[in-house]
Image (cartoon, rainbow, N blue to C red):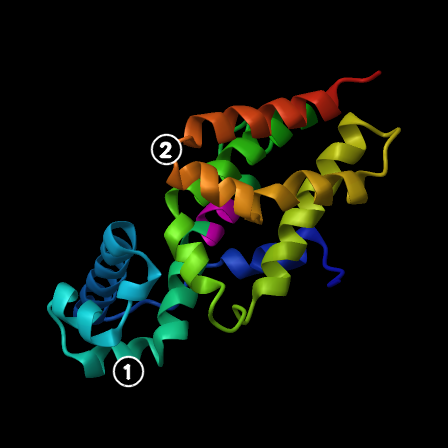
Amino acid sequence: MVNLSMQEVGEMAEDRPRERADAARNRRAILDATRALLAEYGGEAITMDRVAAAAGVGKGTIFHRFGSRAGLLHELVAEPALALMNAVQDGPPPLGPGAEPGDRLLAYFGAMTELVVDNLELMVAYRSESPHPRSEEFHAFWAAHITALLAEARPDVDAEVVGALLLAPLGGEPAARMVRAGEADRLRAGVLALVEAVLRRP
């Protein structure tokens, strides 16, 4: 496990260097087209030819910007993850600083559940590729955030272990099956009920 402070891991969320306007437009078009293909057809639809046609760019543009299919999926995975990290660090409460630890924990798990629901097919496709180059850093950030809040809200439990157990189901098959079956609301309610149960002292 990577041992990083919240401040150290938070450096990942800094803005990327400024892109040329045309490069930024192409990047956005490629990412949006890939998301649309994923939502409509699933991960099998993500070929460079189909993405290029949907985005209105040449295939070489995609290879130049992302390197490979894996690089394209890595970029898509990183976008919502970095957005959530920024919200946790600098956004308004209760997701961001300024709320009680229990309220922040509920807000975080609500936001993470939404991330999973909104990006399910992306995450399924991503699992068939090599891990994101910064996946350990992402996981370290979530673990540090959850552990810190749990340690404040429930100092009587092993916050590191309980936090890992709370987060694990969101990456599992039952969550994916529920979303695909149109039961995202049940998943949201179940996740929050689980966190609320942990927050209640016996």
Q: Is residue 83 magenta?
A: yes
Check disc 1 and report its element: helix, strand or loop.
Answer: helix
Q: Which quarter of the rendering shows the N terminus? A: bottom right
- Mark 2 lies on a secondary structure that is loop
- The residue lying at 25 percent from left, 75 percent from top is 48
Task: Tell me the tag on residue 92.
Answer: none
Front in this rendered view, residue 43 or 153: 43
Q: Residue 64 — which label?
A: 1
Q: CA distance from mark 2 to mark 1?
A: 37 Å
Magenta stretch contains residue 21: no
Residue 165 lies, in percent from the top left, at 72, 42
Q: Main secondary structure of the magenta part?
A: helix
Reply above or below: 143 against 156.
Answer: below
Q: Which residues are magenta?
A: 81-87
| Relative to 87, 200 lies left or right | right
Q: Tell whether label 1 touches label 2 (CB within 8 Å).
A: no
Q: Amino acid at mark 2?
A: Gly
Q: Amino acid at mark 1?
A: His
